[in-house]
Structures are given as C-alpha cells and as structure tokens.
Amino acid sequence: MPLNRRKFLKESAVTGAGVALAGAAAAPAAQAAEAREATGRGRPARRYSLTVMGTTDLHGHVFNWDYFKNAEYRDSAGNAQGLARISTLVNQVREEKGRQNTLLLDAGDTIQGTPLTYYYAKVEPITAQGGPVHPMAQAMNAIGYDAAALGNHEFNYGIETLRRFEQQCRFPLLGANALDATTLRPAFPPYFVKKFRVPGAPPVRVAVLGLTNPGIAIWDKAYVQGKLTFPGLEEQAAKWVPRLRSMGADVVVVSAHSGTSGTSSYGDQVPYVENAAVNVARQVPGIDAILVGHAHVEIPELKVVNERTGRTVVLSEPLCFAERLTLFDIELVLRGGRWEVESVSASLRDARTVADDPRITRLLSDEHAKVVAYVNQVVGRATQTLTTAEARYQDAPIVDLITKVQEDVVKAALAGTEYASLPVIAQASPFSRTSEIPAGDVTIRDLSSLYVYDNTLVAKLMTGAQVRAYLEYSAEYFVQTAPDAAIDVEKLTNAGGRPDYNYDYVSGLKYDIDIAQPAGSRIRNLTFGGAPLDDAQQFVLAVNNYRANGGGAFPYVASAKELWSESTEIRTRIAEWVTAKGVLDPKDFASVDWRLTRDGTPVF
C-alpha cells in the first residue's frame, strides 16, 4: 500500500478518526478585503473570500507542443496548451488573491494522452526499479496542486502504474466511488479537507470530494475486473457530502470526472450515468461548487438548482489539455459562529494569454527532449502521402493500414487454435481528421498521430447477423441526406453528436451505406468473398479493447466470446508492422471495403 494512501486511511473518516487539515494563515490583504456589514448587534459581520482553481483532462500536456507535428501547438482558434502556461495563470491568481486564500484542484485524466505520457508508462516506465518520476507528477507538484480526482484514463496503463504515480504525487488522488471490489471500501482517498485560518474568527474548512467515472469498469475491464468497482456518482456523493458537513465542512467542492449532459456512451451495460455532474448538483444537497471533467468542453459557469434545498450549485469545466483554468470565487460570511457560503461565481482564465512559467520549462526540459527524440525515430519509408482528411466519409487507405495490422496480429495469434480457419475481419475508426503520413521517411510520431489512443487488441467471435447489426449501428454516424440534396461534408457526419471515434470501418467485407435511408436501414449489398453475407457465418473480429468492452455501445461485441487479447498497444503493433516491412506501400494494405450511396448511387 502506498504510504500516502496508508496515512489517509489512518486519518480519514473511513476509520472514523477524522481527517488531517492543512492550515494556512490569512494575509493582511485578506483582512483589508473584508467587507463591513451591520449585524443586529451593530458589529460588522466577518467575511472571507476564497478562490478555488481547477483544471481537468490535462492528458499529459506539459508544454505548448504538438509531438505529432514536431512543432508548437496551434489551432484555428489560437489556443495554447500545457501546465507550463497553467502555472503562470496560477501564479497570477495567487498573487491577486493571496496564495493562502486559494486552492488548486484537478478533475482527472492526467497520465495518458501524449507521447510524453506514453514514454514514461512504456518506454522508460515509472514502475521500473529506480525508474523516473512521472513528468506530470513533477509539474503538478511544482505548481502546488492540493488534490486531483481520478479520471478514467488514469487506469489505461494498469493499477501498478497508477499506484506508482500516486506515490510520486505530493497531493491525494481522490475517488470516492473507486471501491475495492472485495471490501467495497474506498481504494483511494474519497476526500480532502483544508483549513483556512482567519484572524479573530474560526477557520474556514473546505472539503473536496473526488468522484470518477463508472465507465472505467467497461473501458479498462482487463485491469480492474475483480479488483475495483465503480458505483454511480450520485449515490456516492449522497453518502459522502453529509459526512463532510457533519465533520464541520463550511464549503463543499466536488471534483468530478464526469460531464454535464446526463448521457452515457455505454448504453445499459452498467446502471450508472457517465456524464452525471448535473445530476449530482440537482440531487445531492450540501454542495457549493462542482469542477467538471471528462467531456472536453468549455463551460465557464453553469448554475443548477438543488431539488431538495433550492440552493444554487455552480459548475464549471475548463477546456481540456491545460488550455483553460477555472476560478470559483466563493464569498463567505460568519453568522452565529459558523461560516456560511453567501455566493459562488465561476469564470475561466485562458492559457493563450500568458507565457510558459520558466520554472516548469527548466524542470522538465530533459524529459521533453527525450520524448522528442523518441517520436522522431525513422521506422520506414512511405511510397506516397497518406491522410485522414476524408477518412470519415470515404474509405481511406490510411485507416486500412490499421485494420490490416490488426488482422495480421490476430491471425498469427490464433494460428494452431480451433479458430484458425475462421475469417478475420477488423474494425478501426477515423480518430483524427488531420493525421498524415508523408511520402518519404516514416517516424514513430507519424504513426502515433494515426492512432492517438493507447488501445490494445482483442479477438471476438461474431456471427454474420451480429456483424450486420454492428455495421447498421455504426452507420448511424451519418446524417440522413436526400438523394437530390447538396452534399456538405462538414454536415454529413456526427449525427446526434456521435464523435468520429465511435464510427467504425470493418475490413474484409464489402458494403454500401445508403445515407438516404433512415438509421437502421442503411447497410446494402453486404457481401463476403463475393457472395451475400450468410448470417450464420462465424467471423473473428479484431477489435480494440475500448470497443470490445462496450465503449460506444456497439451491439453484440461486448457480450461476444473473447478468443484472445493482449496488452501491447495497437499503436506499437502498427510501428512493428511498418518496421518489419521497411516500405509503407498502399498495395500491401489498402482495399475499398465500403462506400456511401444514396438510393444506390455513389455519393463520391
């Protein structure tokens, strides 16, 4: 058991002993800022101003650098990324408010998402004997985070890597609904409490409850099944918030790795809501503010009225990748010897308005340089440029590369087994709209930009009928378009808000997607081996672990029999395949498996 976790469990309410409170003395500036308000006895009421800062979905972004393009990050909106920028913003806020009047939180998804985080999980892993300190731990420790909620991507590299990261952090990783599967007790600290001292008045006690995403049980099933369980955010908040209030918390802030939409991407596979932050605000009394994560959207301020108390709960989600910093400004007044929250407001600060903190740049320049050198290794040579620019609406060779690699790996894995004679088909998604493998030298960063997630490969046994249903579900991604309507490719996809990563190609078959038809009736001319697909035919589907475990709620695949799986990332398998070939030539992997039609006429 990590030492910091053992200390927490000894001191926390889990064992009924309360929680250690970190103290901070208020500055004279805070006293001067106290407003005067007449009370019934003619004396001024005491006031205190607290600022809670928050980030979320950092995904390994320390610097404003795009490892896939080997250049400074930039987008069409001019955004800037990275904890080095956040550090500058945090320093500014602490200077304005008084550091002793501030708290800094994160809402999860920290240690996965860039080649930087991959490198320190797999190439030079932090779990190795005498291994390095994770760059995200170094940066967040230096900036002075007080606590962080667990995100679902914290589990992508397994529990051992997460526990090592936890040991390296000088702040707790919170997860009130991450429970030991056997004891059903918290496997991580549920909460953190900090005490802010106010001269001549009782201290202000601020409790932070951390909640993570129930989808972890699906998305990282291979790592957590039988070890951890993840009940719903609403029920765990209802359990812990009253406890925190009974312990004397004057302010309760929730850091939740869960969006605000009230929807789930995993259908009915688990009985809990994926994006439950608004539900928590509405259903659980006693919460003042919620730092929202997971959805990768920007919400400066969202006010939700609690159904039981009528009080307003303020929510905010800063943009992902360290592009924004949330500020909750909380005003308290002392009444009857107790601090009461009088108002809460939320706003955002923008990373593009400041420069990197040179202290963070100096701290992690060596780690950054190692990763830049790693991703720029040449592993092969491409005969032509391959791009994902049109991959979401036309069968693109660059995505065929993914399916070809997956087919080859699964065929080799099943050789000599009873399933060796079954045809292998494969799924892949157009993850990126900007990935490009240029003609000429091919580097690890080129291939990493094609497959941006740390997914691994699974083989599932499917019937022809199940594959047909799978394709129909995937085809819901397209907007229904009349045969005579003009085609605008920017409005052709993402029907119902479905993201690109939840649209799948399936190789080894041929089929049309008739977008003039309503969803559920679009797959036409589905053939295998030149003949109409036999619904009873058995196939081996080479599928990523996210999809295999139910991510995206595709039909049948999660419940299908698993024939094989591995822990090596698909990205690594692609690099191995290209390295072994030496030459990346579309004739070795490209095939036209599907096309869009309208009433039988090709769209393109």
Image (cartoon, rainbow, N blue to C red):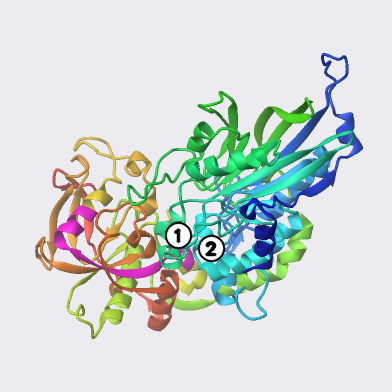
For mark 2, give the secondary structure.
loop
**Between 267 and 208, the one nearer to me in the picture:** 208
Q: Position of residue 460 (x, y in %)?
A: 27, 67
Residue drawn 43% across the image and 62% down it: 220
- Looking at the image, residue 71 lies above or below residue 351: below
Q: Is residue 431 magenta?
A: no
**Residue 352 located left or right of residue 92:** left
Q: Give the range drawn in magenta.
A: 448-470
Residue at image point 85% right, 27% down: 34
Given residues 251 and 597, the one toward you in this image is: 251
Q: Name the residue under label 2.
A: 68
> What secondary structure is found at the residue carrying circle 1?
loop
Q: How crowded is mark 1: few (under 14 residues within 10 Å), some or many (20 or more)?
A: many
User: Looking at the image, can residue 586 be seen?
Assistant: no
Quadrant assignment, res 391? bottom left
Foreground pick, 214 / 284: 284
Q: Which amino acid does label 1 sit on?
A: Ser
Between discs 2 and 1, the one toward the N terminus: 2
User: Is 449 inside the magenta-drawn segment?
Assistant: yes
Q: Up-down: is 296 above or below 312?
A: below
Q: Mark 1 points at which residue?
A: 435
Q: In the image, residue 325 lies at what x, y percent?
A: 66, 43
